[in-house]
């Protein structure tokens, strides 16, 4: 089993002891737990590139808005520990809220502009919570490399920006989105979906294939592509609402004309579950 720490001080003591014994590179995979194949890809990459890997499991309350799914977010630390063991993870950090937000915490991290578009419009405060907790976790672990999924593409861009702006000495390693065989991106929130809802959720991936096919056929007008995607997605019975379909350059600037390497980003509601996904135009 990996070593499990609840306290940052204990984690630091352990890592310091290891560092006295030998030199090693440290990889870090921050998660909210309920580990799936997407998380596993991040962990495997870290294991390949580093001698020691730390995984954190922490459902961060400050990145959930009022009325969101903080309380019902799936949690199973025993299962997560077993997954980490299977993958050869050295250390799991599962801190308490008090460890991350000591009494009277007043400091927050906010990445302007990038936090205000796309997800930021629909989940105000979300990226402030993310940026704050990731900064704290990076300070707690002090890894050489930290691994983030492209599944949460805007989050990845915000983290890259914050480590640059705050001079945090860590290499951010992006990892491609892992999908189920039928194309649905792995997400801890997929457990909320009924079989019928899951079928409707597949429309996201299929709309990316549709868009890619249009682009392959020579269509480059974003508005036309987005319209087709919307029409297709809304033809699925359990899709309640599309929050956005956006086409941007890799830095999240909206594009009117699509090129290879651009991103198509979607957020929508299937039943009472909100899902996000994105696609790199090939
Ligand atoms: P979460 O536990 O949902 O906060 O995710 C923890 C990390 O895993 C984040 O960097 C996510 O982007 C990444 N991740 C989540 N789902 C996937 C996926 N399907 N493929 C790749 N990375 C993922």
Image: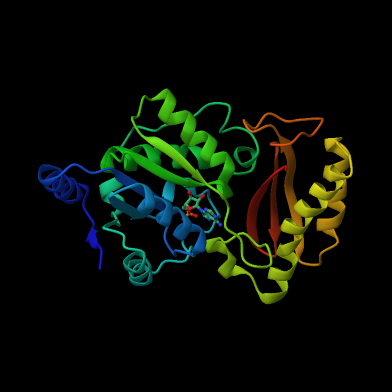
Residue 259: x %, y % from top left: 76, 33
Q: Nearer the viewer, residue 200 or 242?
A: 200
Residue 176: x %, y % from top left: 56, 49
Q: Is residue 106 left or right of residue 193?
A: left
Q: Is residue 280 above or below residue 36?
A: above
Residue drawn at (82%, 53%) of the image: 210
Outermost residue toward the bottom in this view: 195
Q: In this view, does 207 lie to the left or right of 136?
A: right
| Residue 125 seen | no
Position of the C terminus by quadrant: top right
| Residue 210 seen | yes
Residue 30: x %, y % from top left: 39, 50
Residue 40 sits in which quadrant? bottom left
Position of the N terminus by quadrant: bottom left
Residue drawn at (70%, 53%) of the image: 268
User: Could you tell me how many numbered marks the image carries?
Assistant: 0
Q: Which of 59 and 170 is in front in this view?
A: 170
Residue 128: x %, y % from top left: 47, 37
Q: Is residue 20 left or right of residue 259?
A: left
Residue 83 sits in which quadrant? bottom left
Q: In this view, does 8 lie above or below 85?
A: above
Residue drawn at (87%, 35%) of the image: 221
- According to the image, what is the colour scheme of the structure? rainbow
Residue drawn at (73%, 36%) of the image: 260
Q: In this view, does 129 lie above or below 43?
A: above
Q: Is residue 41 left or right of residue 104?
A: right
Q: In this view, does 70 lie above or below 79?
A: above
């Amino acid at each position: 089993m990996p070593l499990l720490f609840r306290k940052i001080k204990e984690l630091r003591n352990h890592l310091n002891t290891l560092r006295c014994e030998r030199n090693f590179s440290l990889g870090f995979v921050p998660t909210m737990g309920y580990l799936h194949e997407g998380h596993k890809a991040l962990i495997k990459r870290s294991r390949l590139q580093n001698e020691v890997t730390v995984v954190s499991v922490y459902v961060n309350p400050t990145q959930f808005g009022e009325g969101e799914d903080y309380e019902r977010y799936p949690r199973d630390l025993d299962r997560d520990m077993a997954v980490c063991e299977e993958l050869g993870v050295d250390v799991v950090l599962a801190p308490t809220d008090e460890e991350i937000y000591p009494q009277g915490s007043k400091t927050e991290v906010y990445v302007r502009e990038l936090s205000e578009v796309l997800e930021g419009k629909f989940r105000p405060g979300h990226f402030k919570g993310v940026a704050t907790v990731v900064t704290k976790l990076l300070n707690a672990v002090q890894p050489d490399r930290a691994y983030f999924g492209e599944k949460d593409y805007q989050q990845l861009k915000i983290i890259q920006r914050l480590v640059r702006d705050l001079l945090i000495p860590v290499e951010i390693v992006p990892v491609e989105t892992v999908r189920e065989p039928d194309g649905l991106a792995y997400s801890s929130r997929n457990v909320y979906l009924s079989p019928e809802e899951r079928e409707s959720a597949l429309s996201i991936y299929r709309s990316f294939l549709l868009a890619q096919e249009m682009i392959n056929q020579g269509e480059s007008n974003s508005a036309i592509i987005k319209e087709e995607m919307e029409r297709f997605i809304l033809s699925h019975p359990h899709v309640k609402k599309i929050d956005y379909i956006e086409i941007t350059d890799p830095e999240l600037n909206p594009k009117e004309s699509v090129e290879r390497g651009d991103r198509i980003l979607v957020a929508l509601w299937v039943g009472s579950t909100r899902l996000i996904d994105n696609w790199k135009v090939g």
